[in-house]
Image (tube, helix red, strand yellow):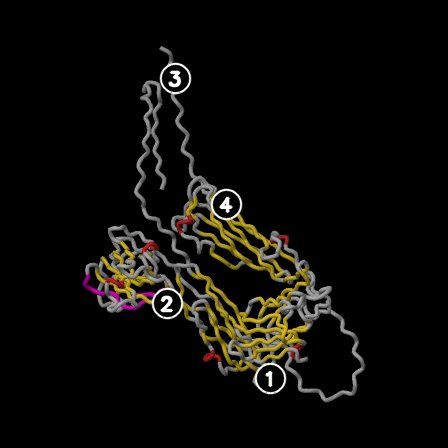
Amino acid sequence: PSPTPPPTPAPSAPPTGICIIELEMNCTTTGEGVPSIPCTEIPPETELVCSCPECVRELLFTYNGSPCEPNLAANGRCVDSLAAPFVGDITCTNTDAPTEVVVSGQFQLGETIVMTPAAGQTCIPDSLSCTISTPEGATAQTVEIDASCDGGRQLTLLENYGFFTSVGYSCDAMDRHNCLVDIVYDLEVCNRGSEEETIYFWDFILNDTVVEDLLANIPAEDTTLMTDECLSAVVTEFVNRCQDEDYCAESTANATNPTTGVPSPCDDEEEIKFSWAVEPPLPTLMPSPEPSPAPTPAPSPMPTGTCDILVEIDGCFNFTPVGDNNCEGRPVQISFRYNGGDCSQSDNLQDRQKFDCFDIEPPIGAGPPPTQAGVESYIVATQLGGGSVYFEGLVEVGKIFTLNEDLEFDKLAADMNVTVYDPTGPEPIVQGANIMQTQFIHLSCSQPLFLKDRFGSAQVVQWIEDDGRNVSCFQETVTGDLVVGLDAENQEQPVRLLEMTIISNLDDEPINKTEEVFGQILEPGGEIVLEPLSIQVDLTERVRYTFFTTIIGETLDGSQMCNGFDFYECIAGVALPPFFPTLAPTPSPTITPYPTPDPETTTCEIRSVIEC
């Protein structure tokens, strides 16, 4: 017989998955009427002094709240009456024709004011008279602005004119000179590897400050990418072309699981840098004065310099990220945020045998529940099948309600019925015609339970277990100290503090600190340390908390108003990792078997690989 053929070589090993994350970032200018160019090609503004061949047709100012400059106050062109209101009623007219209005409206501190020719006119008048008032009608400041724009430095970009800072002017549609230019960063992270990957971290940093967590507004299920699938994000900022600037934008993306540490390494980063230098305008030489007549008695001297109070929050708050947020013991108390809305928003890992939700719509009921913040619903939580009542009462959309809040019961029922009623329906409220939604929830922890789980209109935010373990989205913390000071170089007189408020995105109402500061005397070079702010942060969401502080005072002789303001922001919280339900394995594929090979001449090797 012929010799037996050599054995068939063993098949090559299956390829090992490689994690490759690719991050791209581009920066371009944006805005109506502005050509889009790369940020690295943005030119500095070279014509800082307003100079137009015919006349100026648009002026841009920011409402900064600074007191009158000494030179404007000395000649009577600027008069301070009150500190700058956070929201000011601003009107600017032609000084020689007050019926010609170039701007009128309400503006917040930091907002841009656009002045254009009055109706029927083609040019902005050479002189503008502006009045800034409080919303109650009290005049805070009057200022006269020379807008002749003949190149004589009457109007210069980035200089202050009372409460205003000049940031732009236009002689015509083709001759624009704006300091502030909007830019947009377009970012994209892609999976270039051979297997699906989950993006766990993606941020954007500008000049060493974290500006945005780019995953904060992306649903968790969308962060898992197949091969060549991408996520995109857009960050809008602005740059100042009228002063020396250095910009460094950085972004980092990571697909390494923070819990397991695999796959590693699996990240990428991008960086864009651009800068410019601006030549300051040459000083305008004043003509030699004519001989002065005989001297007259000197008037009382005007206060020199500006009276600025220094105020700041000395540091962000500390917080401890949420650790394991799964239910481990029998809850004795649980809190939900009432979001309103229908059953379709439910998002939890309980199976249908343990959780179900029904919207009872007309004509049988009154559902689904409302979603508008502040609207009340009547909620009743009882043991399934009736019996113990763990909560009953009115709850506003956006507010929190707690089952067994007074710990009347030693534990919660394992199976709970939560029903939402329309309190505006027929009496009594608790009747079938008023039902908007009813839910069946399992709360013994034999079923999965995590923070931020959604059960219809209710969302889990906290619970306490029978061993005392407290699992919560929230943490009480404090900011750094509030420090108020007076710069000895710019102010020689002591200042009496009058008012202090803080506007924050934590609350609709300002935080009033006037009682703590009113009447206190601040010496030049001295400082006063106030108690920090107590706040509650949501640890399960990455949130930017902002604080805008304003303070008002006066010199002891009452001759000069003083003020100061500070904008501070802190970022706290870490988004919870996504949870994915365990899916039943898919059935093995059905194949047509090959003919049975000859065992005498065929090498056989079986290999099985399972990856998880």
Task: From the image, tell me which residue sits under label 4.
Answer: 22
| Residue 255: x %, y % from top left | 44, 48
Task: Write down the quadrant of residue 195 in the picture.
Answer: top left
Which mark sits nearer the N-terminus, 1 or 3?
A: 3
Q: Secondary structure at mark 4?
A: strand
**Does the CB distance between marks 1 and 3 fall below 8 Å?**
no
Which mark sits nearer the N-terminus, 4 or 1?
A: 4
Closest to the observer, 289 or 260 = 289
Could you tell me which quadrant the N terminus lies in?
A: top left
**Does the CB distance between marks 3 and 4 fall below 8 Å?**
no
Q: Secondary structure at mark 3?
A: loop
- Circle number at residue 268: none
Q: Residues within 10 Å of mark 1 (few under 14, many from 20)?
A: few
**Does the CB distance between marks 4 and 2 fall below 8 Å?**
no
Cα distance in 3D space between marks 4 and 2: 44 Å
Task: From the image, tell me which residue sits under label 3.
Answer: 5
Task: From the image, tell me which residue sits under label 1.
Answer: 559
Task: From the image, tell me which residue sits under label 2.
Answer: 374
Which mark sits nearer the N-terminus, 1 or 2?
A: 2
